[in-house]
Image: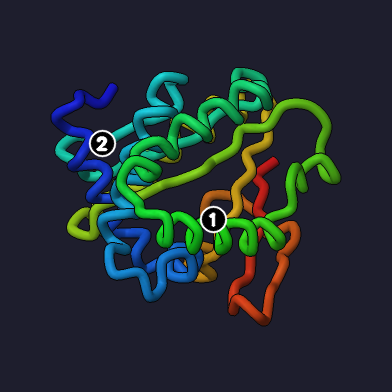
Amino acid sequence: MIKQSELKTYAELMKTRFMEDPGVIFQVKDLDRAELLIKAQFEGQIEAFMEAHAVQVLEDGKGLLIGYSTRDLPEDRLMNMMQQSSQKLLALANQKELQVLQDRSISQGQIIPQSWHTAYCDGAVYHLLIIATDASSKGTGAFRKLITPVLEKCAANKEPVVLETFNPDNLPIYEHFGFNLMESHTSEDMGLTCYCMMRS
């Protein structure tokens, strides 16, 4: 569990790592306060998912994972958490920023197919939302330390793990851990591709 005093450290980690992500770049490009807004968004996300015990961390701000089983987090509760996670961003952003973020989020949503995994499996899945590790921990096994307990638990429960990413650099990393690319959806207008991956 993250203490309140550590929240900003982990939000800073997420911001630093995801400011290089094509999806986030698209979301906040040309916004003067991009980094501040993204950090507020991540702080809210961590807090909301902590309440559902869906956040795991490495000590000293070195890594963070957010994910949940659809068995534990039904759709209505997930929607409430998503609304809750946006409160810090809503409090910080001005009307113009909110409009830009909202419009871009709607655009992005067009290439993130909802419940795409139901075409490949029945029943509950574990949805891996975010993994971020500090750049200084590269080569130390930090990513493995975060993801292995999740994969072991899901294997024991016979629960597939699914994720979406906009970053093609992530594909070989996840493939190394047994994920397969199931489908991808591209928007030429946005210059984005959403890659949908699953580990059975």
Q: Does the CB distance between marks 2 and 1 fall below 8 Å?
A: no
Q: Identify the mark at residue 69; answer none if there is no mark.
A: none
Quadrant in which residue 196 is drawn: bottom right
Q: Which residue is mark 2?
A: 58
Quadrant in which residue 76 is drawn: top right
Q: Earlier in the sequence, mark 2 or mark 1?
A: 2
| Side of 159 where 49 appears, left or right | left
Instruction: Pick the residue in front: 53 or 112.
Output: 112
Tell me where residue 83 appears, x and y as whole percent.
Answer: 51, 33
Q: CA distance from mark 2 to mark 1?
A: 32 Å
Quarter of the figure with the C terminus: top right
Q: Amino acid at mark 1?
A: Gln
Q: Secondary structure at mark 2?
A: strand
Residue depicted at x 58% and y 61%: 103
Q: Nearer the viewer, mark 2 or mark 1?
A: 1
Tell me where residue 67 appears, x and y as whole percent.
Answer: 50, 34
Tell me where residue 32 appears, x and y as whole percent.
Answer: 29, 69
Residue depicted at x 54% and y 55%: 102
**Residue at the front extreme, as displayed:** 95
Residue depicted at x 31% and y 39%: 43
Q: Which residue is mark 1?
A: 102
Is any part of residue 145 visible from this angle?
A: no
Instruction: Pick the residue in front: 57 or 157.
Output: 57
Quarter of the figure with the N terminus: top left
Q: Secondary structure at mark 1?
A: helix
Residue 20 to residue 128: above or below:
below
| Side of 143 where 115 appears, left or right | right
Q: Amino acid at mark 2?
A: Leu
| Side of 120 where 8 appears, left or right | left
Residue 38 to residue 43: above or below:
below
**Residue count near mark 1 (Cα–Cα under 10 Å), binned few <14, some 14–19, many ≥20:** few
Tell me where residue 82 appears, x and y as whole percent.
Answer: 52, 34
